[in-house]
Image: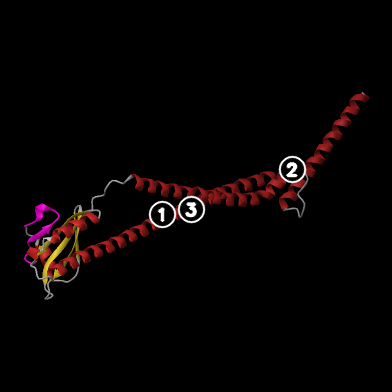
Amino acid sequence: SSTGCGGMKLFTRMKLFTRIYAIALLGLLGLLAALLLLTQQVQQMRQAELQGLRDGHLLRNLRTAAENYLATGLQLEQLEILQQVIAREQAAFVGVLAIDVFAAGGKVLYSTDVGNRGTQVPEGWRAWLARDLPWDSTAPGQRQIGTRFENDLGQAAGGIVVTFSTVPVPLTLAQWYERGQQAVQWLAMLVLAGAAVSALLYAGLRQTLKPYSDAAHVLQGGHPPPGVATPWVQAAQAQRAQWDAARQRTQQGMRQLEELDHGV
């Protein structure tokens, strides 16, 4: 019948909208995941940029101090004040394990690590003195940056190496609080976006199913909605007219039977 066919079509459309709703939610989750990944990448790039600025600032300060003290005419071995300089710089920057100042011959003259003073630096450090450029290297649990400093003749008088720890440190309470706030913000965005998608799909589903609800209202004996009747409403009106005609015939037949019974 037309009613059964309409029910099948209604069921099919509801399944279609369920799939559309699922696809929309998956797309929304994918979009939020992409935004989260992009945010993390931007943060990592920002951290790398800040790290580069910090490294450059620290090496420039140390090199300038060493060259300025050498310009006074003292020998590198006589510049005990460099020990105070590197101790101050270590205290000013988080994560600095040690700062070493070594002579061109490779001997460590000043260091924030007392055990390093008087030792020979790795050959790789001395090799970097041939270039007037900062250098960096990594090792398990640490990262090192360095630069050479020059005497009045423009020759390498020695080098400075800063060692940073790369071991992750436990998050502070403030950092945990900040991450919790970020998680809440992302969750709120997900809930709001999901609600918006649900509202839009509900409105679309309601508009699409309106002809079926109008037809069901007519089949239940209600008046058709004002305006141009849709094919579903027209079919419902025809079906309703057939039901009314059949009911009238049935009632008329029942009356005729009652009259026959009374006549007998």
Left-right relation of 8 to 63 = right
Helix, strand or loop for disc 1: helix
For the N terminus, give its image quadrant: top right
Q: x, y (%) of residue 26?
A: 47, 51
Examine the rendering and report whether any part of residue 121 can be seen. no
Give neighbour class at mark 3: few <14, some 14-19, many 20+ (Cα, 10 Å).
some
For the C terminus, give its image quadrant: top right
Please state which of residues 171 and 78 is positioned toward the viewer in this rendering: 78
Labels 1, 2: front one: 1
Residue for badge 3 = 28
Examine the rendering and report whether any part of residue 60 can be seen. yes
Q: Amino acid at mark 2?
A: Leu
Q: Amino acid at mark 1?
A: Leu
Cα distance between the residues tagged 1 and 3: 12 Å
Labels 1, 3: front one: 1
Left-right relation of 148 to 249 = left
Please report whichever mark, 1 or 2, sits nearer to the chain's N-terminal start.
Answer: 1
Disc number for residue 36: 1
Left-right relation of 115 to 241 = left
Please state which of residues 263 and 110 is positioned toward the viewer in this rendering: 110
Q: Which residues are magenta?
A: 104-118
Residue for badge 2 = 219
